[in-house]
């Protein structure tokens, strides 16, 4: 029976977790209807993709779709929580049978399908440009506003991805797949910034080696906050609460041990057993050793 190498296994896994056109089509339909509603009530300037849906690191059937809603300053409140409530009420009027709730910095719309059919709308107030990229104020979770620039961060990740033979974004996608498959309460943005920053000093990426290394580094740093490498968002935190951080660290420790076991088996040329350990890392979703 034909078998796979570890590299072939990761390539097959990446193909599996990359969203297809069907998912993109559903997201686009939401974008159009949300745009019309916010144009009518908030003089919306632009609704655009942000987060993993915008930069090629989303996970098939698991990542929701993030939108930045560029709204004029005079249509927003000094207290960002008040703006979130107003936008929530506005969208609820358009979608009365849809579950809509506030989860700062976003208003979340659950259209009744699966996770990939969930949209997050983040109110964004344009404030300046940096390196020719727009910078916005978005809700910070405490009623204030904080700086964010999706296009600047996307450019940062894309530049490093190209330098590293277009293997950085798949590596980030593997980290996010672990997060989703194992229900790890950790910020996707945090994982993306950590991975990109750490890989700045590398000349190439080997998926199993570098994924194992990043899991170890995440554990070694105790999921400490990271200062935004682009100097826009200040400090970026791994988790939204101490309880979630404790849970994330526990699951991270398990993943790190399993990834190291996979590497040990690969070094011993026990590729089948290495596949089994990687399958444990990804909660039973990694491809089989046998084709």
Image (cartoon, rainbow, N blue to C red):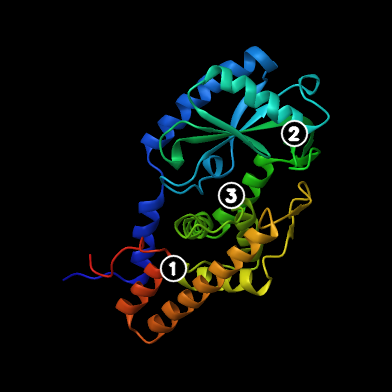
SS at circle 2: helix
State the residue position of label 2: 81
Where is residue 202? Give x, y as percent: 60, 68
State the residue position of label 3: 158
Real-space Cα distance between discs 2 and 1? Answer: 37 Å
Crowd rating for badge 2 (residues with CA inside 10 Å; few <14, some 14–19, many 20+): many
For marks 2 and 1 on the same chain, the one whose residue lies earlier in the sequence:
2
Q: Nearer the viewer, residue 236 or 156?
A: 236
Q: Residue at image x 45%, y 47%?
A: 62
The quadrant of the image that shows the N terminus is bottom left
Q: Residue at image x 77%, y 33%?
A: 80
Nearer to us of marks 3 and 1 is: 1
Determine whether label 2 and label 3 are within 8 Å by CB: no
Q: Residue at image x 39%, y 83%?
A: 265
SS at circle 1: helix
Position above or below: 24 against 272: above
Q: Nearer the viewer, residue 59 or 102?
A: 102
The quadrant of the image that shows the C terminus is bottom left
Where is residue 13? Give x, y as percent: 37, 58
Nearer to us of marks 2 and 3 is: 2
For marks 3 and 1 on the same chain, the one whose residue lies earlier in the sequence:
3
């Amino acid at each position: 029976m034909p078998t796979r190498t570890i590299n072939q296994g990761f390539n097959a896994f990446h193909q599996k977790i990359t969203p297809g056109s069907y998912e993109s089509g559903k997201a686009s339909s939401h974008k159009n209807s949300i745009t019309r509603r916010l144009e009518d009530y908030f003089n919306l300037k632009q609704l655009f993709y942000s987060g993993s849906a915008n930069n090629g690191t989303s996970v098939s059937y698991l990542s929701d779709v993030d939108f930045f809603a560029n709204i004029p300053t005079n249509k927003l409140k000094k207290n960002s929580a008040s703006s979130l409530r107003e936008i929530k009420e506005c969208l609820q009027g358009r979608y009365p049978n849809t579950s809509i709730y506030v989860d700062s910095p976003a208003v979340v719309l659950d259209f009744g399908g699966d996770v990939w059919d969930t949209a997050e709308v983040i109110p964004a107030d344009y404030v300046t440009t940096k390196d020719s990229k727009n910078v916005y104020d978005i809700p910070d979770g405490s009623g204030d506003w904080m700086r964010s620039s999706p296009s600047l961060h996307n450019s940062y990740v894309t530049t490093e991805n190209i330098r590293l033979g277009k293997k950085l974004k798949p590596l980030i996608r593997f980290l996010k797949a672990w997060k989703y498959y194992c229900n790890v309460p950790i910020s996707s943005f945090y994982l993306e910034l950590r991975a990109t920053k750490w890989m700045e000093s590398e000349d190439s990426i080997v998926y199993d080696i570098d994924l194992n290394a990043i899991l170890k580094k995440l554990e070694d740093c105790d999921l400490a906050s990271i200062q935004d490498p682009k100097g826009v968002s200040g400090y970026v935190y791994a988790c939204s609460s101490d309880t979630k951080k404790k849970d994330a660290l526990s699951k991270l420790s398990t993943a790190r041990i399993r990834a190291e076991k996979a590497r040990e088996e690969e070094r011993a040329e026990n590729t089948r057993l290495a596949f089994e350990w990687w399958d444990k890392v990804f909660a039973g979703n990694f491809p089989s050793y046998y084709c």
